[in-house]
Image (spheres, helix red, strand yellow):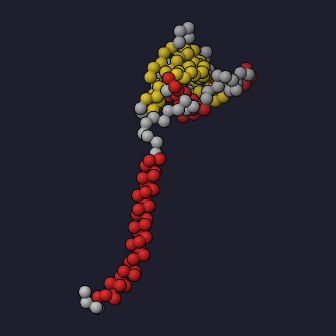
Amino acid sequence: MPHASRPFLATLMIAAGPGLLLLSACGSGATADRAKADSAKPAAGPSCVSTDSTPVGLAVLDFITKAEPLPKRFLSAAGTDSAMPDDGFKVLQDKGPTYFYSSDTVAQRKIREKLEEVGPYPSMLVVFRGKTEADNGNTVTVRLGGHYVGGDDHGKLAPTRSFEVRCDTTGWKVAASKIEAGA
């Protein structure tokens, strides 16, 4: 190599050396960090856990979308063991205006009056009747019932239904539902 090119090469090495060192240090760390992150990821599969309330939401959605007549407004018992759990209540809110329905007859009358003012839409009080778990929490049976409040359908029962909600490789799904005997 001629002597004239040595100072240029030396200058290039001095200028580029730290950058190359920095790049190689960052590159190997990123690969190691990526490998750590990949190994820390949980295995792909359903995110079903026994404390999950998703089965209630799925059962409520199935219950209200198959009701006849199709309800456009919803009521949920307030402060009782029949009150809708949060996931179920969120489903009701997503499907239409939702009101708390008190056991107090004066408050009930006020709600019915409010419903009549708004219009003649079918309104259903959806009642949570409980849930049970089986198969290590991978199968949940949710029981729901209800009746129509106000309007032409006032007092019409929505029979109690049992919904079997199962966790499979893709998550929670309603596997079966049936009207309970005597409902």
Compared to residue 41, the image places residue 98 above or below, namely above
Q: Nearer the viewer, residue 71 or 134?
A: 134
Instruction: Answer whether residue 16 is visible to the viewer in this image.
Output: yes
Quadrant including the C terminus: top right
Instruction: Specify the farthest residue to the bottom.
Output: 4
Compared to residue 17, the image places residue 94 above or below, namely above
Q: Nearer the viewer, residue 50 or 13?
A: 13
Q: Residue at x 36, y 80 (%)?
A: 13
Q: Nearer the viewer, residue 104 or 18?
A: 18
Q: Residue at x 60, y 21 (%)?
A: 130
Lateral position of residue 31 relative to residue 163, left or right: left
Instruction: Specify the farthest residue to the left.
Output: 1
Please state the horizontal and vertical placement of residue 24, each as a whole percent of the image: 40, 67
Please state the horizontal and vertical placement of residue 39, each as a whole percent of the image: 44, 47
Circle count: 0
Q: Residue at x 25, y 89 (%)?
A: 2
Specify the quadrant of the image occupied by residue 173. Answer: top left
Please state the horizontal and vertical placement of residue 25, each as a whole percent of the image: 43, 66
Instruction: Answer whether residue 119 is visible to the viewer in this image.
Output: no
Lateral position of residue 181 relative to residue 30, left or right: right
Q: Residue at x 39, y 77 (%)?
A: 17
Quadrant including the N terminus: bottom left
Please state the horizontal and vertical placement of residue 100, each as a whole percent of the image: 66, 28
